[in-house]
Image (cartoon, rainbow, N blue to C red):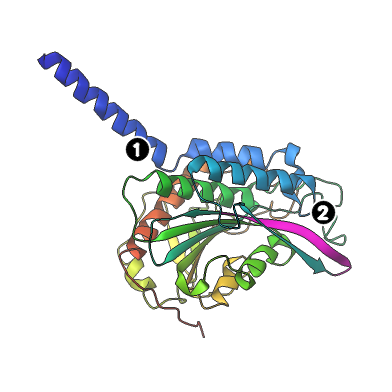
Amino acid sequence: MKKCLLTGICALGLLVNAHAQDTLPSAKRIQQTVNYLASDKLKGRGTAEKGSTTASNFVAKQFRKLGLQPVNSGSYFQDFTFDRNAHKSIPSRNVIGFLDNGAARTIVIGAHYDHLGTAGLFDGKYPVGQIHNGADDNASGVAGLLELARYYTKNAQKEPFNFLFIAFGGEELGLQGSKFYTNNPLQPLANVHFMLNMDMIGRYNPERGIGIGGFGSAQEWPEVFKGVTQPGIKFFTDAAGKGASDHHNFYMHQVPVLFFHTGGHDDYHKPTDDAPKLQAQSEESIINLEIQLINRAMEIPLIHYTEVK
């Protein structure tokens, strides 16, 4: 009987440990996500190209698997069109999933899923016809988005905030997805606790560390960051709320923001930004750092937007 009891306790412990491992960010899963999104099959996820639609369908499928709710009349998609130079009515869409914790306020987690594709919409700025796979930019950010969605949906503890996970389209053509969303929000922007954006978080340079922008966009950020450390990860902060990624449009609508970015590299916007160059283990640690900051920010009932002078 004693042996059976001990066996049962051990089995329960293994189940709990397995659940914890499934919940925590995983370098293996991150690499698998980037391998798919940055594969030649998707041809660079270019806006208005087939690969972009395939990528958006993939994200929606992951949202559904994780149990996130669609918030746009039963759809995970928010379709829109935009004009760019001579190109008119370019189609794209955001992918949106909601974790409803019954709270009054919501945290927005975002990353853009599009990249340059075969560069047909960039008026000769990049080599037309060549596949730009965009492993770091921004399959890495989408992998982070899905890891955070997994962590907060599978966490047994009900958080005091809701979560809205958004994979933005059309970012490379002028932050179009976040521009459309903030002009046509599916939930009131006044109820957003803060917005966290990930754009290029897969090429960690230990000499530089990861930059975290938006530090000046809320008066509570210094308190949230105080004493936060993550083994193997060095980070620095930047006050700017504006910037060349999707957090910019939330900041312009007076939403506090945080922007995670591991910096530029020689493969930026080139056909050589491929999945084997991803540093998945470092990205796992970066996401764990983000979880620390998100959890600390949830200890504060209201984060106050401040304009960065």
- Residue 90 appears in the rendering: yes
Residue 131 rendering spot, x and y as whole percentages: 79, 45
Residue 146 rendering spot, x and y as whole percentages: 52, 47
Q: Where is residue 62, by image quadrant?
A: top right
Predominant SS along the magenta part = strand
Instruction: Give the Cα distance between marks 1 and 2.
Output: 41 Å
Residue 28 rendering spot, x and y as whole percentages: 50, 35
Relative to residue 231, is residue 4 drawn left or right? Answer: left
Relative to residue 273, is residue 306 drawn left or right? Answer: left
Residue at the image position 71 percent from the left and 43 percent from the top: 54
- Residue 276 appears in the rendering: no
Query: Magenta segment, which residues?
Result: 85-96
Q: Quadrant of the N terminus?
A: top left
Disc 2 secondary structure class:
loop
Relative to residue 113, is residue 225 drawn left or right? Answer: left
Q: Which residue is mark 2?
A: 119
Residue at the image position 36 percent from the left and 56 percent from the top: 292
Disc with the residue nearer the chain's start (1 vs 2): 1
Q: Answer few, some or many: residues within 10 Å of disc 1's Cα (few below 14, many 20 plus, some between 14 and 19).
A: some
Q: Where is residue 61, by image quadrant?
A: top right
Q: Where is residue 221, by image quadrant?
A: bottom left
Residue 34 sits inside the magenta stretch = no
Disc 1 secondary structure class:
helix
Residue 93 sits inside the magenta stretch = yes
- The amino acid type, in three-letter code, at marker 2 is Ala
Is 71 or 23 nearer to us in this picture? 71
- The amino acid type, in three-letter code, at marker 1 is Ala
**Residue 20 circle label:** 1
Q: Residue furthest bottom?
A: 309
Is 93 or 285 nearer to us in this picture? 93
Question: Is 37 situated above or below 113?
Answer: above
